[in-house]
Amino acid sequence: MSTQTLNILHISDVHFQANEKTNTQDRIVEALVEAVQNYERSIDYCVFTGDLANHALESEYKLAESWLEEIFSAMGNPKAKMLICPGNHDVDRKLIKSVTARGAASSQDMFNEYLEEFEDTFLSLGCFKSWHSEFKRKNSWVVSEWDKHVNLVSDINNDFNINFIMANTALLSCNNSDQGNLCVDLNQLNACLGQANRLGGLNICMMHHPIEGGWFVDWNQKELENLLGQQTGCHFLMSGHVHDAEGHSRANNYGQSLTNFKCGSAYTGGKWKKEFSILEINIEDSRVTPNNFVFSEQSGNWIKNNEQSQSILVDFKNAKKKLT
């Protein structure tokens, strides 16, 4: 079998603000397009892990969509695909009651009752969903799905199944005190992981909030770590939210392991360091190299941070499976 490689552009937390559009915003996002265009290797997928907008406004998504189209063109690969995940800033907080959300997080039974009682649990993500549906209709290279709170999108790349398990971690997001109160729909996650394993190939989980850092309520956190870390879980996880690019891997003597690649922000304001990543994945060598780029305020360009771009070993042995 020839060496299987894959390159994934990972962007997160751009926070477009139509009513606060500045020259700084233009400079950062336009320079990011140029950095992608100048990258020396073909990019297969663009994964955006949430907070595309800042206040979940239609005008903000309109700003974002032209930029996303420029990003796709800059990738220079007509066969490339893009997947977009919602974040907590894609939530319209006026449409979710904090008392109800916090009550739903208190136990698995309460969370299940919440999902059963409120038929439209996507209400607070209505603007994001509406925009995403229309954007996908106009651009066939957008392949993300948001029919449920956890969705599986499977694609074929060089005779490999690439299975993206996309989890909505903003389901119970309602204010600035989300830490320790969020939940992922574990039933839907379990179903997607089972389907991905029946298909075979590479399993990549993507969601806005990272699995560590205390964002999820304890009972949900424990089961989430257990499911994703299983040998039949995901090969690695891609997340955003914390505005800091970092990759790390951990394993235990039960045979569980989990590699997490957190993306920095391409934030158009604020004090945070601006970062994005391009993951070079070598399945044959069980290695992922996260090429992390940092925006230089001095030069106005995105510059590769070599110190923060070292390879990480990832167990891909059960992904080395060609389609029959």
Image: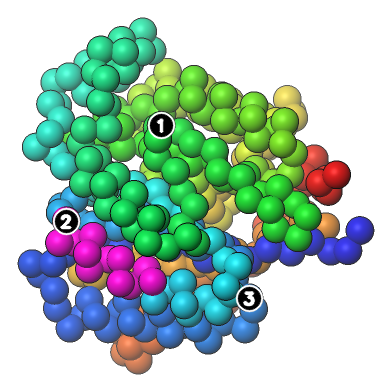
Residue 216 or residue 191, whichever sits in front: 191
Q: Position of residue 31 (x, y in %)?
A: 36, 83
Under mark 1, the amino acid is: Lys
Q: Where is residue 149 in the image (x, y as percent from the top left)?
A: 40, 32
Instruction: Based on the picture, tell me whether residue 138 belongs to the magenta stretch.
Output: no
Q: Which residue lies furthest to the front in this view?
A: 137
Q: Where is residue 188 in the image (x, y as percent from the top left)?
A: 49, 25
Mark 3 vs mark 1, CA separation in Å = 31 Å
Q: Who comes first in sequence, dot 3 or dot 1?
A: 3
Which stretch appears magenta? Answer: 58-69
> 10 Å neighbourhood of mark 2: few (<14), some, or many (≥20)?
some
Q: Which residue corresponds to mark 2? A: 58
Q: What element carries label 1?
A: loop
> 10 Å neighbourhood of mark 1: few (<14), some, or many (≥20)?
some
Q: Who comes first in sequence, dot 1 or dot 2?
A: 2
**On the picture, is 74 further left or further right than 313?**
left
Residue 185 or residue 276, whichever sits in front: 185
Residue beneath the point at 36% across and 13% down? 112
**On the picture, is 307 further left or further right than 89?**
right
Q: Tell me the mark number nearer the camera, choosing from 3 and 1.
A: 1
**On the picture, is 301 further left or further right than 235?**
left
Residue beneath the point at 42% across and 18% down? 219
Mark 1 vs mark 2, CA separation in Å = 21 Å
Under mark 2, the amino acid is: Glu
Q: Which mark is residue 148?
A: 1
Q: Which residue corresponds to mark 3? A: 42
- Residue 54 against residue 78 in the figure, above or below: above
Mark 2 vs mark 3, CA separation in Å = 32 Å
Instruction: Based on the picture, tell me whether residue 62 belongs to the magenta stretch.
Output: yes
> 10 Å neighbourhood of mark 3: few (<14), some, or many (≥20)?
some
